[in-house]
Image (cartoon, grey):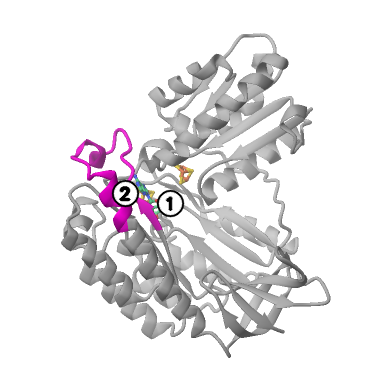
Amino acid sequence: MLYFIKTFGCQMNAHDSEFLEGLLAQHGYGPTEELEEADLIVINTCCVRATAENKIFGFLDSLQRLKRMNPRLLIAVMGCLVSEASAAEKVAKRGHIVDIILGTRSLGRLPFYIEKRKTEQGPFVEIDLEADVPEGRVHKRNDPFKAYVTIMYGCDNYCSYCIVPYVRGREKSRDLEDILKEAKDLAAAGVKEIMFLGQNVNSYGRGLEKADFATLLRAAHEIPGLERIRYMTSHPKDFDENIISAIADSPKVCRHFHLPVQSGSSRILRAMNRKYDREYYLALMEKIKTVFPGASLTTDIIVGYPDETEKDFEDTLDILAAVEFDLAYTFLFSPRQGTPAAAKKQLPQSVKKERLQALMELQNKIGLKKNQALIGKDLLLLGEGKSPNNAAYQTGRSEGNKIVHFPAGQDYTGRLVKAKIISAHTWSLEGRL
Ligand code: SAH
Ligand code: SF4
Ligand code: F3S
């Protein structure tokens, strides 16, 4: 039996798909890259912006022909998009080709419903966001050197624009011991870099006794064999002194700070329910720059939030220039049904697009300047294998998450190497070993 899996969305979803693949392997399924060959098609979905949702419906529609040709083909749709009842219903009705629909906390029920489908007609829908995700998930990890480790599920922050709390349920931290055991086992198996995953990792441990994010970082730092520790995503409001000193004391924790600012305007930040203002954010970045000189700084920004004025937008441009981020992920505000921001009067699309363009232009200049400042410096890289555009080159990633291409006569995958940077582009660097 063969499955084809397609994953949309963030690292959390990518990791959930690793779990689904592990689960399917335990039940006698093997992977295929050919849709036509699959007995089961799994779609792990995202709904953070309308663009993600549209792509998923497009993909679903493209499967109609396959399902007609092979009525025994099973189609299962999981994850964020279908974790809300009305969206699940829409998916179930779309072309009437979907057999199984599972919410983000019910993924483990896939084998049960595959069995059930043998004797009953679908579609089966199970969403239960109150459910606890059981321990002992087995993952199919494709990279022997890098691995994701979930530290918490859900999100309780309710940023006004964001659908995630409604589709991933309440925040729930895994036990510290369980996380550390998983990380130790991975390191023992040769993994060099782990990334701790959660929607708001800095609040890890809320509801647990004697565990917080700083404790987790310090403990993970002691694991033999691990070389690098990353985490995703931080929330500026919870990025406190404790965390900063834990990182300062733990050189394995990468000097890369991804702190989504979302907007440079205090007024918009308040409307977004982010619980910090511009001054707080700037002070936090100053602190980080002082404690970790040369650290890589990245962020997420939303433009065109309802009621964002020209002045608010200028504050965003201004914070970009003030902090000088290495990279900013920029998004057009996308109203998500059920969130407070979606009910507000929206800005015209043309205004949003113009602002996004201006933001990207400014950030590209800053990013290039920051990369150029690395010329002549030595960076420690974790090898990722062949460079995509030049067979004589290998690629590695720096602690600051920069991609560096370098000429090499052998494979450096999974190895730490030092390279001197000789030239810089907006998205990558070139170095010499
Ligand atoms: N928990 C993480 C990830 C959230 S989704 C965090 O808090 O950063 C990743 C990014 O998508 C967010 O940081 C935000 O910039 C963007 N985003 C979320 N909802 C959005 C929306 N409705 N429209 C546009 N961008 C959005
Ligand atoms: Fe969404 Fe905010 Fe939670 Fe991030 S912290 S997932 S942006 S609600
Ligand atoms: Fe998308 Fe869900 Fe991640 S909505 S961004 S896949 S948490």
Q: Going by the image, does 241 lie left or right of 98?
A: left
Q: Position of residue 114 (x, y in %)?
A: 66, 21
**Quadrant in which the C terminus appears:** bottom right
Residue 344 located within the stretch drawn in magenta: yes
Task: Name which quarter of the figure residue 282 lies in.
Answer: bottom left
Q: Is residue 80 visible to us here?
A: no
Q: Position of residue 109 (x, y in %)?
A: 59, 28
**Nearer the observer, 259 or 299:** 299
Look at the picture and state if 345 lies above or below 280: above
Q: Is mark 2 within 8 Å of ligand 2?
A: yes
Taking the spot 44% from the left edge, 80% from the top edge, the residue there is 369
Read off the residue under disc 1: 199
Disc 1: residue Cβ within 8 A of ligand 1's nearest atom: yes
Q: Amino acid at mark 2?
A: Asn
Task: Look at the image and give the residue range highlighted in magenta.
Answer: 330-355
Mark 1 touching mark 2, by CB under 8 A? Answer: yes
- Whether residue 324 is visible to the viewer of this picture, yes or no, is yes
Residue found 41% across the figure and 42% down from its top: 48
Q: Tell me: residue 361, above or below residue 71.
A: below
Sort mark 2 into few (<14), some (14-19) or many (20+) by Cα contacts within 10 Å: some
Residue position for label 2: 157
Q: Is residue 314 magenta?
A: no
Q: For mark 1, does the 10 Å Cα neighbourhood hold few (<14), some (14 to 19), or many (20 or more) residues? A: many
Task: Say what secondary structure mark 1 lies in.
Answer: loop
Circle nearer the N terminus (1, 2):
2
At x 65% / y 20%, what residue is drawn? 65
Considering the numbered disc 2 on the image, is that residue within a helix, a strand or a loop?
loop
How far separated are the C-alphas under marks 1 and 2?
Answer: 9 Å
Q: Nearer the viewer, residue 142 or 52?
A: 52
